[in-house]
Image: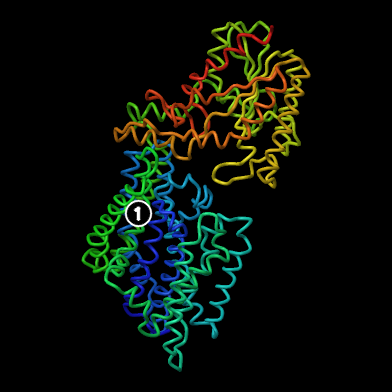
Amino acid sequence: MHTFGSRRDIDGLRALAVIPVVLFHFGFSTFSGGFVGVDVFFVISGFLITGILFREINAQRFSFVDFWARRARRIIPALSVVLVAALALGWLLLTAKDFSELGRAVRYQALFISNILFMRQDGYFEPASDLKPLLHTWSLAVEEQYYIFFPLLMMLLMRHVRHWRWLLFAMLLVSFGLNIAYLERKPDLVFFSLPTRAWELLCGAMLAVLPASKQAVKPWLYQVAGVVGLVAVLVAVFTFDENTVFPGWAALLPVLGASALIWSGAQGSTWVAQVLGTRALVWIGLLSYSLYLWHWPVYVYANAISIDGIQHWEAAGWMLLALGLAWSSWRFVELPFREKRVLAGRKPVLVGGLLAMFALAVTGAVVRSADGFPQRLTGKALEYAQARDWRAGQMKCMLVTSDKNLDKACLVGANQGEPATQLFWGDSHAAALLPAIENNAARQGRPVWLYSMSACPPILSDEPRQRCKDFNQRTMEQIRRLQIKDVVLASNWSLYVYGREDGDRKVLLNPRDNAAEAEARMAAALKARVAAIRATGAQVWLFKEVPLQRKGTISRLTSLARVGRSAEGLGRPLQEHLARQGFLSALFASMSAADPGVHVIDPTPLMCAGQVCSIEVNGHSLYRDEDHLSDIGSARLSPLFAPVLLGTSDN
């Protein structure tokens, strides 16, 4: 291929890449596959960068210093501004934990390895992603790693390997093969890593080094290729979604589509190239790097100060802000450096870029080591942040997987010299009830046992985790030995039936179960446990789980307080909570109806007012995280346990 000059169609293709990404991230479901814009960017970068290398190595005027100086001039100035802005806004809006995580992300991105950080954390499509202002930099890190290693590879291949193009193509196939081979076993690695994404960049690279054809390509062929390429990219944008297994085979559609668009535009003027070369698309294409950099932090911070998420009419305003910031960044940051009005020499720009990245890496490390500077927070924001910590001793009353024995249990309340005949049993959600238990136990002047183990439901089943099985067996023995009269079972029940809302099914009793099988398994296991407890003569109280809140909404309390906004109305819609609890509610009701010694305790009426299950009440957070109660939230449920601790079952 021989056309490397300025191409308006490639600028337009950049717009075709960035617009769907922005619309997808801002929640426009029509663009459900907008994330493939990143793959289009990879193809463009591979084509343009390899074209530069190919020309300069062929002409024997290639210089690593020149190449990296141009890359630094192109990438680092705007990136540095965005990283500083993200830190400044994070200082203002984020909780200590989230700001600490932001510091770590800044450090990793300053070292050009943020993709490795995000690979180890929640996946790209997870709700937790909305809390990471720099998540989008993973793709920049992939490209930056490519820029570091690929010039050396090209130099070696072109100088020492006769059929180097075939070797380059073989590397493309190997990378694609790794992408397919590891997609199911290590999906995050495949999504975020250079070795499994390199094939997309190499598709563009192969276009750049194709030998010039001896015969002119027939116009109809490149016209058709342009149309097919455009259709392929658009089909991916409009039909892919978060459930698409990606990259995998699916990534071929946008990657080959982008490749076809670049190839067809190089053969001659095509209809599609004329569309991509229109003034509006070219203008957006010129801003595409800055727009990509700015749009995601704008989204994350806008989402942090919203009550019920960003609505479409709000999203339009925030996208305009991102576009304005992108234009300003392009006009006043990118252009002065690219036109060599600032740090004109290659060594000054390289040294300046390295110093900027070093300073940002150090700043990020300081933020991380200072735990996000919790002393930033004052007033209501501080109170919300403090609700994220259990202070009543819940962790002391809960077994975790690192405990070497199963002896941890808590006896709480008054008159602890007397025999305790009430026992609370469950996973960490039982531990979260400690303030409510203590309040009642102290008021009634009696002691109460609390047995809890993280991630272990109090059921009788073929539990795959031996520690859970051992813990539950020991607790059952204690019920018999201590002659317990009332047992309260509390757990995040739906977690073990449906998995996490982000799609994680590893927590199910059997991850291979479908929904119906998981429900049947839970019903049998819970009924077996209740029957075993009832056989000891004790009564059973089934505590239904508290409403689960959406990912990220608890952190939002602090952000709202920092900008002086009320959090009233923030919470899970009641109907969503009732829908998730439908099967469990029916199961509990049937067990209670079948046995007068089985009772149901429902926290929903105290947690949900009107149509919302609120996160906070009267300025106090009810939650520690998205599903565990805070100390105040737990204490608020104290009235629910009065019948248990009054000993009404003694009669």
- Describe residue 263's horizontal placement relative to residue 438 as left or right: left
Question: Who is closer to the viewer here, 583 or 2?
Answer: 583
Q: Position of residue 311 (x, y in %)?
A: 36, 46
What colouring method underlies this structural image? rainbow
Note whether 622 is above or below 363 in the view shown. above
Q: Which residue is mark 1?
A: 295
Which of the 4 image quarters holds residue 215? bottom left
Q: Given the current orientation, which residue lies at the most extreme left position?
A: 341
Which corner quadrant holds the N terminus?
bottom left
Which of the 4 image quarters holds residue 101? top left
Q: Position of residue 107 (x, y in %)?
A: 41, 49
Note whether 518 is above or below 609 in the view shown. below
Q: Given the current orientation, which residue lies at the most extreme bottom position?
A: 215
Question: Who is closer to the viewer here, 411 or 537?
Answer: 537
Three-letter residue code for mark 1: His
Note whether 290 is above or below 366 in the view shown. below
Q: Residue at x 71, y 28 (%)?
A: 471
Which corner quadrant holds the C terminus?
top right
Q: Position of residue 649 (x, y in %)?
A: 67, 11
- Describe residue 302's horizontal placement relative to residue 335 as left or right: right
Q: Residue at x 57, y 68 (%)?
A: 175
Note whether 191 is above or below 447 in the view shown. below
Secondary element at image label 1: helix
Which of the 4 image quarters holds residue 90? top left
- Describe residue 331's horizontal placement relative to residue 354 as left or right: left
Q: Position of residue 358 (x, y in %)?
A: 36, 53
CA neighbours of label 1 inside 10 A, class few (<14), some (14 to 19), many (20+)? many
Question: Who is closer to the viewer here, 418 or 647?
Answer: 647
Q: Residue at x 44, y 88 (%)?
A: 212
